[in-house]
């Protein structure tokens, strides 16, 4: 069996790592032996151990969290590759692709680098990436961005990520999330503004939501807490929605990984706005291992990102049959083509438009059901883990023969 050495930068389980994990069983069944070089401790290493995948320690950061010198990491990688002589190196991120390119070229080992980000690259970074045998972009948007910047068009291909359609599937809500949050019964001190049906002056009057539904709507946003994900825009939109709907609760699922000052300030501002403008109706849930179940409990998923190469949570939500409102950025319209009626797409950084789309779906259950069913069909047709794995295996075979 040809060994595939997969290079991972972080010890965490974000979208890129989860997408890689979804392919490992199929890669092994195709006759390859996947081995992962990554930080030896953390959620990724634990997930790999559960699958019986060998982990070789490789870290790009020092004990303080700073970047190790690139030359030192490359030297360590060169020693590892010289010792193991894998049949192929698969760098699972742009950063690891840049690290590996010159090393694998010098050792004459075929290499493939995954491009999972849309960001500006220096000339040197482009040259390093072009040293790889092949480059895989997760969307046409990612490929076009980087080839315009100088990546070699002839070696840059598109391969969509895939999700487990059995794990992420439609199903009736059980109410467990409402119960966990203490929202499983009506509370007289929470109200919905409704228009009074009688009298000479029609006006908005408060009506306890317990008279309308025992379970208040849940709007989820899932992802890393950071500026790029646009959770601040979601909260701005939620404030607008709350002018008409005080029964809606908002779930922010994820955590902040960056320790930069601007990232800490961003998270602090989210908490401030949530408390000051939406007190008691925003729930910061942190990392969750039950995202598949959670997606079946929520009224809708909102993805307010400012940029998104190909949002994994959007694939998971689509597979789960969730109603989705997302910003039309990056590869998102490749998941939800504008004429497909699979999701509501809105421009980024426009909380008014986002609020309008959220309010429309909150008020129209049949529409949510139609969008969710269409999203599920789209996921089955284009974004299964099996389809992604088959594509990756074919790239492995072609690169190995180069």
Image (tube, rainbow, N blue to C red):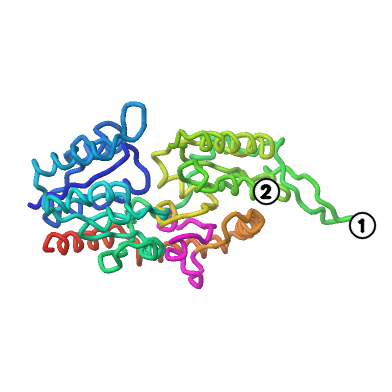
Does dot 2 land on a helix, a strand or a loop?
A: loop
Does residue 200 belong to the magenta stretch?
A: no
Q: Residues within 10 Å of mark 2 (few under 14, many from 20)?
A: few
Quarter of the image where one finds residue 396: bottom left
Furthest-bottom residue in this view: 339
Please indicate, yes or no, whether residue 398 appears anywhere in the rendered image.
yes
| Residue 302 shows in the view | no
Which residue position is annotated with label 1? 200
Mark 1 and mark 2 residues within 8 Å of each other at the beta carbon: no
Across and down, in percent, residue 3 comes to 11, 49
Residue in the picture at 13% in, 39% down: 79
Instruction: Give the number of the disc on residue 221.
Output: none
Percent x, y for residue 368?
55, 60
Residue 212's tag is: 2
SS for tag 1? Answer: loop
Q: Residue furthest front?
A: 123
The residue at the far top in this view is 63
Q: CA distance from mark 1 to mark 2?
A: 25 Å
**Which span is picked out in magenta?**
317-342
């Amino acid at each position: 069996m040809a060994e595939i050495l997969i290079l991972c930068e972080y010890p965490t389980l974000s979208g890129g790592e989860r997408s890689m994990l979804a392919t490992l069983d199929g890669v092994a069944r195709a006759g390859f032996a996947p081995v992962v070089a990554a930080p030896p401790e953390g959620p990724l290493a634990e997930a790999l151990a559960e699958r019986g995948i060998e982990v070789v320690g490789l870290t790009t950061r020092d004990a303080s969290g700073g970047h190790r010198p690139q030359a030192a990491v490359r030297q360590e990688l060169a020693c590892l590759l010289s010792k193991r002589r894998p049949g192929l190196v698969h760098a699972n991120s742009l950063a690891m692709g840049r690290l590996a390119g010159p090393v694998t070229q010098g050792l004459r080992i075929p290499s493939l680098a995954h491009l999972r980000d849309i960001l500006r690259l220096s000339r040197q970074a482009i040259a390093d990436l072009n040293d790889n045998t092949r480059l895989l972009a997760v969307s046409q948007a990612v490929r076009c961005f980087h080839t315009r910047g100088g990546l070699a068009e002839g070696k840059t291909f598109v391969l969509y990520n895939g999700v487990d359609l059995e794990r992420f599937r439609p199903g009736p809500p059980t109410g467990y999330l409402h119960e966990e949050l203490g929202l499983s019964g009506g509370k007289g001190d929470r109200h919905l503004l409704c228009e009074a049906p009688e009298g000479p002056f029609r006006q908005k009057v408060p009506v306890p939501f317990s008279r309308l539904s025992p379970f208040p709507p849940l709007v989820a946003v899932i992802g890393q807490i950071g500026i790029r994900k646009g959770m601040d825009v979601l909260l701005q939109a939620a404030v607008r929605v709350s002018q008409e709907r005080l029964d809606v609760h908002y779930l922010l699922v994820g955590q902040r990984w960056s320790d930069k000052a601007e990232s800490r300030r961003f998270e602090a501002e989210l908490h401030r706005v949530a408390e000051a403008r939406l007190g008691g109706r925003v729930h910061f849930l942190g990392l969750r291992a039950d995202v598949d179940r959670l997606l079946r409990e929520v009224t809708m998923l909102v993805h307010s990102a400012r940029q998104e190469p190909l949002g994994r949570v959007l694939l998971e939500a689509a597979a789960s049959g969730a109603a989705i409102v997302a910003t039309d950025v990056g590869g998102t319209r490749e998941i939800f083509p504008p004429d497909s009626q699979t999701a509501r797409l809105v421009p980024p950084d426009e909380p008014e438009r986002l609020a309008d789309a959220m309010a429309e779906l909150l008020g129209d259950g049949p529409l949510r059901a139609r969008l969710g069913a269409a999203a599920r069909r789209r996921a089955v047709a284009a974004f299964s883990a099996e389809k992604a794995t088959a594509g990756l295996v074919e790239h492995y075979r072609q690169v190995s023969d180069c």
